[in-house]
Amino acid sequence: MISRIFSTLALWALIFVTLWFFRTSGGLVLVTAITVLTLREFYQLMTAAGWAPFSGLGMFFGGLITLAPFIEARFGAPAHPLLALAAVVMAIRVVAERPPEKRVEALASTLFGLVYVALLLQYMVRILTPLPADTVSADGRLLLCLWLIAVAKFCDVGALLTGLAIGKHKMAPQISPKKTWEGAVGGVLTSIGIGALVAWLGRNELGATLTPLHAALIAGPIAVIAIVSDLIESVIKRRAALKDSGHVIPGIGGMFDLSDSLLLTAPVAYFLFRLP
């Protein structure tokens, strides 16, 4: 528990320092790094499950797909063909480089990683990237991204502490035995409180884009999605028969263990923010 607390504080310090000093550029680098490192661990899980994905090429395309909205906004180059191009390249490689009994699994696992990790985290880049017709400032977009991270990750914290204190009824024992319904409720309530607090603290930048009341109302469903997102990672780890996706973060596990709750919540938050 001590190592988990220390790692959590260190990660939040890294996020704050990066966003404070490097603003949008720092946020884009962080999201891209999270994508690539998460894909690395995802493909390791797929390899452990016997599916033989194209890890290196997947991470390369994953970084580009995640950055696509920024590339399009900054340089005017259409970035939407990247996923299709990745599918074409992977299809060519799978015929030449994988044995017949591995081809379907190799292609499916590589492309699923691009969709589930890179394409979904792309919505964090969409939140971060300033646009000409913006009604919210560049710093406001940074705060929206920070708000999303806080709501999603504090749901984990609230669920853990509530579950340890009063958790009795198992939520999904075959997927994640330690999760309880009591913990889930505690996590959602924690996210609602954190969402309202962050919106209030950032009210000068966020203005009418995300008032504390609006933040509290949308934090609830985002927290529920964060719990589902965490369960999906547990499903993937169980398929690979591994407890953790990695060991790079003491007390937490791997980058996938850290980013799991952001994957499904990023697109949901983007649409709920009603950004252009």
Image (tube, rainbow, N blue to C red):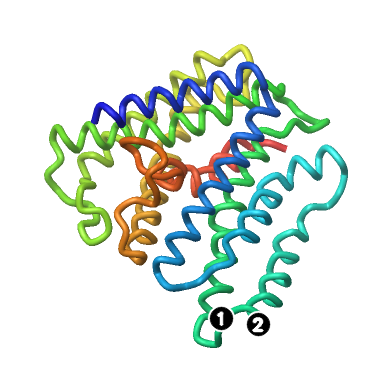
**Residue 89 x/y as whole percent:** 72, 70
Q: Quadrant of residue 173?
A: bottom left
Pick whichever, 78 or 181, lies toward us.
78
- For the point 83% across and 31% down, the residue is 132
Secondary structure state at the residue bearing disc 2: helix
Q: Quadrant of residue 276?
A: top right
- For the point 55% across and 42% down, the residue is 34
Q: Is the residue 240 above or below the residue 129 in the image?
A: below
Give me the C-alpha separation between circle 1 and circle 2: 7 Å
Few, some or many residues within 10 Å of mark 1 (<14, 14–19, 20+): some
**Residue 272 x/y as whole percent:** 57, 39
Q: Are marks 1 and 2 in contact (CB under 8 Å)?
A: yes
**Residue 59 x/y as whole percent:** 61, 54
- For the point 34% across and 35% down, the residue is 250
Secondary structure state at the residue bearing disc 1: helix
Residue placed under numbered mark 1 in the picture: 103
Sequence-wise, the earlier of marks 1 and 2 is 2
Pick whichever, 119 or 136, lies toward us.
119
Few, some or many residues within 10 Å of mark 2 (<14, 14–19, 20+): some
**Residue 256 x/y as whole percent:** 44, 47
Residue placed under numbered mark 2 in the picture: 95
Q: Is the residue 166 above or below the residue 231 in the image?
A: above
